[in-house]
Image (spheres, rainbow, N blue to C red):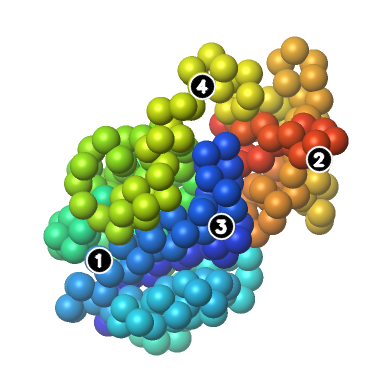
Amino acid sequence: MRTVVVPVRRLDAAKTRLASLLTPAERGAVALAMARDVIAASAAQSDWETWVVSADPGVLAAAGGAGAEPVPEEGTGLRAAVVQAERRARSRGVSELAVVLADLPWITPASLRRALEPADSIVGVRAESDGGTNALVRRPPTAIPALFGRLSFARHQEAALRAGLTLRGVDSEELAFDLDRPDDVRRLLEDGRAGGTRDVCSQLGVAARLEARPSAVDRRREGEMQGTVKEFDPESGTGVLLLDDGTEVAIDPASTEGSEIRYLRLGQRVDFDVDDDGERKLARGLHIVTFA
């Protein structure tokens, strides 16, 4: 039995790094469009079944409508969703398990097929943005642990070596491009290739907003900054980041809820966007830079 797993986070917490460009509802619409594109490409693989793991009713409904099996998420965050899928795979006798992330707007059935075809024990597609892993195929599903996030492709390679295996990397422009920041949306629109995600961005009039977007220098003044974790409470997701100039910025708990960001450590380096809620500046869309 061969299974593709597509973990999809709740739409109301999706794509916080696009907060400077899109409203929460618009971010949810873009995230759903990307998930639909990925689910459709997965469901088109006739010799693989597709599971969509999510806590979002809209995502689960979309999965069922596309011919995939909706799996209500039991935990929170990407790691928990993958672990849940691995448990399910063991109970169902799955021999080949592929995890494909849900924010790949250029994915096509053919590009996904090229990642699923190699018979190697471990196959992966490296994310061009941060060295993460956008797709991971394991035969069997327990061949190595799943380690997603920034620079995880290299960590998957190391895990394979420790297991006496080799990770086969698949070069795929369609699967290597993920949509996370406003500049990714710009690239998506300028490229011109068809897709549901591009259609939604066009309908929202995002191109005009990008034209009016400030320069890179001004954007760095507004957000897209780096800092060090000074305080962090994993229970509430609240904390404080210390900028290089000594300024303190509070962490928006909505940016950490249901994500691996809940495991931030003191001294860890992160980058983020800064928004003003009218009373104070808040760090949103956190992304880990260093793991130490």
Disc marking residue 25: 3
Figure quadrant of the N terminus: bottom left
Q: From the top left corner, tell me how far across and down residue 76 is, in percent.
A: 63, 65
Q: Nearer the viewer, mark 1 or mark 3?
A: 3
Q: CA distance from mark 1 to mark 3?
A: 25 Å
What is the secondary structure assignment of the residue under circle 3? helix
* Residue count near mark 4 (Cα–Cα under 10 Å), binned few <14, some 14–19, many ≥20: few
Residue type indicated by callout 4? Pro
Judge by depth and name the residue closer to the eye, 255 or 119: 255
Check contact, mark 2 vs mark 1: CB within 8 A: no
Disc marking residue 41: 1
Q: CA distance from mark 1 to mark 4?
A: 35 Å
Earlier residue among tags 2 and 3: 3
| Residue that appears at 50% across and 74% down | 58
Earlier residue among tags 4 and 3: 3
Figure quadrant of the C terminus: top right
Residue 131 higher or lower than 237, as above or below: above
Disc marking residue 239: 2
Q: From the top left corner, tell me how far across and down residue 188 is, in percent.
A: 31, 41
Which residue bears the numbered disc 4? 214
Q: CA distance from mark 2 to mark 3?
A: 26 Å
